[in-house]
């Protein structure tokens, strides 16, 4: 048998043994099952908060208190969407931690709840597109592409009021994500931008 053929056979046996060794004994951990609900909703976002699980979609905000086995619509105060695009896109607990939730609806605005989603009220209404919502330190950052040229909205009072932060973002396009490391805040758009002053000004890092 030639050396090349022997090497080919050895390679085949070695690869086959790796596949065999990587195959789990039980496949139960790989299986998924669909939960009964939320009914009739196209879900865009999931968020857990304490004993509650929240789901945001086209129809409303839904809440589960039994690990997703049953769901209830908790949509009081959020007006029905004008179109399919106006679904709940972002759901997050705010900087206060245990007392307030923020829900963001694309092309519409941000809503706040102080009773674990039972009722909501608008905190800022805008036209434009919302992509991301993130708590960094004691501030809440909303990113997207809003009317008037704003790309970032910041709240420093737990979601009660919002201020645009656009310095240095004239070429960012639409903001899609935030991250923080140390005392610096990063955002993603047309490139990556960084701020060392809490978002007051940002510099582009392509």
Image (cartoon, grey):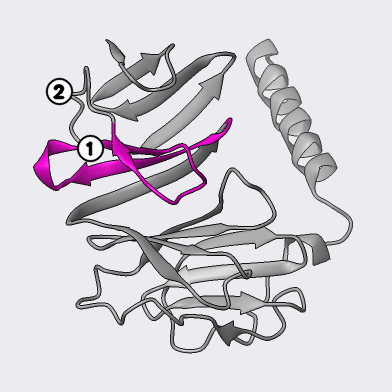
Q: Residue at x 62, y 70 (%)?
A: 115
Q: Does the magenta segment cover residue 143?
A: yes
Q: Is residue 1 visible?
A: no
Viewer-side residue, 36 vs 72: 72
Helix, strand or loop at label 2? It is loop
Answer above or below: position of 120 versus 159.
Answer: below
Answer above or below: position of 14 versus 183.
Answer: below
Q: Which residue is mark 2?
A: 171
Residue 27: which numbered mark, if any? none
Answer above or below: position of 95 versus 138.
Answer: below
User: Quadrant of the image for the C terminus?
Assistant: top left
Task: Give how far across and how far down residue 80 sits, in percent.
Answer: 30, 82
User: Crowdedness of circle 2 by 10 Å Cα count: few (<14), some, many (20+)?
Assistant: few
Answer above or below: position of 177 versus 64.
Answer: above
The magenta stretch spans which residues? 137-164
Please indicate whether residue 36 sits to the left or right of residue 113 in the image: right
Q: Which residue is mark 1?
A: 174
Task: Give how far across and how far down residue 111 sits, in percent.
Answer: 41, 63
Q: Residue at x 34, y 44 (%)?
A: 162
Task: Give how far across and how far down residue 151 sits, in percent.
Answer: 24, 36
Q: Residue at x 66, y 23 (%)?
A: 8
Q: Would you identify the image quadrant in which residue 83 lies?
A: bottom left
| Count of numbered badges drawn on the protein | 2
| Callout 2–callout 1 Cβ contact below 8 Å | no
Q: Does the magenta segment cover residue 186?
A: no
User: Quadrant of the image for the N terminus?
Assistant: top right
| Distance CA(mark 2)–CA(mark 1) | 9 Å
User: Crowdedness of circle 1 by 10 Å Cα count: few (<14), some, many (20+)?
Assistant: many
């Amino acid at each position: 048998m030639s050396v090349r053929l022997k090497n080919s056979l050895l390679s085949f046996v070695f690869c086959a043994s790796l596949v065999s060794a990587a195959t789990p004994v039980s496949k139960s951990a790989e299986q998924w099952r669909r939960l009964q609900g939320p009914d009739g909703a196209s879900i865009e976002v999931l968020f857990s908060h304490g004993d509650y699980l929240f789901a945001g979609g086209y129809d409303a905000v839904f809440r589960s208190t039994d690990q997703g086995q049953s769901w209830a619509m908790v949509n009081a105060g959020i007006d029905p969407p004008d179109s399919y695009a106006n679904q709940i896109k972002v759901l997050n607990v705010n900087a206060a931690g245990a007392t307030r939730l923020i829900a963001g609806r694309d092309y519409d605005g941000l809503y706040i709840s102080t009773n674990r989603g039972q009722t909501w009220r608008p905190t800022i209404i805008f036209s434009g597109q919302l992509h991301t919502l993130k708590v960094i330190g004691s501030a809440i950052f909303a990113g997207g592409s809003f009317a008037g040229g704003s790309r970032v909205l910041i709240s420093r009072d737990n979601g009660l009021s919002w201020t645009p932060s656009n310095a240095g973002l004239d070429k960012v396009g639409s903001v899609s994500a935030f991250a923080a490391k140390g005392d610096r805040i990063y955002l993603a758009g047309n490139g990556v931008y960084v701020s060392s002053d809490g978002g007051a000004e940002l510099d582009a890092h392509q």
